[in-house]
Image (cartoon, rainbow, N blue to C red):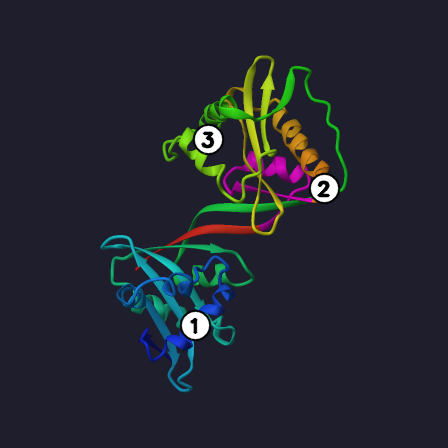
Amino acid sequence: MFTCKKLKSTNINIFRGLNSERTTFNYLNEDFFYLYDKINPIDKLMMMKKVILLQHRESLDYVGYIWTYKLNKYNHKIRALNIIKEYKYEIEAYSGLLNCAFKENSSVNYVCSKNSYNFYILSSLGFERYNGTLEMKKHINSLVYLEGPRELEVCSLYGEEGDNLRCQIQNSVFESNNRIPLTMDDIIFEKKQKYYYENGCFLLKSMDEYIGYGQVIFEEDNIPCIVNFGIIPKYRGKGYSRYFLNYILNSVYEANYSMARIRVSSENKIALNLYSSMGFYVEDEIYKWQFIK
């Protein structure tokens, strides 16, 4: 029913139309022409080689495409994958693209946001789901006062001293073998970004020790997003996280926002239970998928 075609100058305008519908399958699909239209002719030819189009054999209409990136000989990344709405449930269409794009023994990674059908398609194709991130949202209708332990105090973060404290706390909260420690250079870089909110950095203090950090940033949709939130290990399990998160939510409300967002690993059941109990609900699920041909 379908056949694969190379991307050429003769069909690139058709591909522009397919690219414009890329979010049908996955809103995280990358925009090919955002890069393509900015580069020189030689680099454009190299980019075109990474795209395979899918054509219907009878109608000759182009119905989908895959855009890939080769990490090394056997490891690949899918930058975008999409089949138009009329054929979006056709497993044969997706498998045809995968067979054309990858050789035997290839390992393929793809980051995908869940919709009503794409996780089913990926599972049917033989992809396995790994590392997930849940995006949660909460409506804030009023201030909520929680009485915390007397020894707790929330402080705002200012200046180099505050940045150093942030480094220390975040590196303690999120320490793992797979994480590169945060540095002052990272913070300096972050402060130059559009999403950075100067009044959105909070330190949690117990007596004379700083024990937690939380931050509010603003993304493109201008909804406050709570990030880098956590308590250092030895102070966990005492209810401090609930008090600290509630304080940050109150700060968001006092800044005249009625919505907040937070992200959490799908494996972090403790955090998921905390956020759910405080009124957050899952709005989006993003997972890394792997396919071995």
Report which quarter residue 74 is drawn in.
bottom left
Looking at numbered disc 1 in the image, what kind of residue is underneath it? Answer: Arg
Residue depicted at 60% across the width and 13% down the height: 207
Residue depicted at 33% across the width and 67% down the height: 51
Residue depicted at 54% across the width and 43% down the height: 195
Residue depicted at 60% across the width and 34% down the height: 200
Say what secondary structure mark 3 lies in: loop
**Disc with the residue nearer the chain's start (2 vs 3):** 3
x%, y% of residue 34? 42, 62
Residue highlighted by disc 3 = 174
Residue highlighted by disc 2 = 256
Disc 1 and disc 3 in contact, CB within 8 angstroms: no
- Write down the region rendered in magenta: 259-283
Q: Residues within 10 Å of mark 1 (few under 14, many from 20)?
A: some
x%, y% of residue 46? 27, 65
Determine whether, in the image, residue 132 is placed left or right of residue 255. Answer: left
Say what secondary structure mark 2 lies in: loop
Q: Residues within 10 Å of mark 2 (few under 14, many from 20)?
A: few
Report which quarter residue 67 is drawn in.
bottom left
Determine whether, in the image, residue 260 is placed left or right of residue 121. Answer: right
Residue highlighted by disc 1 = 16
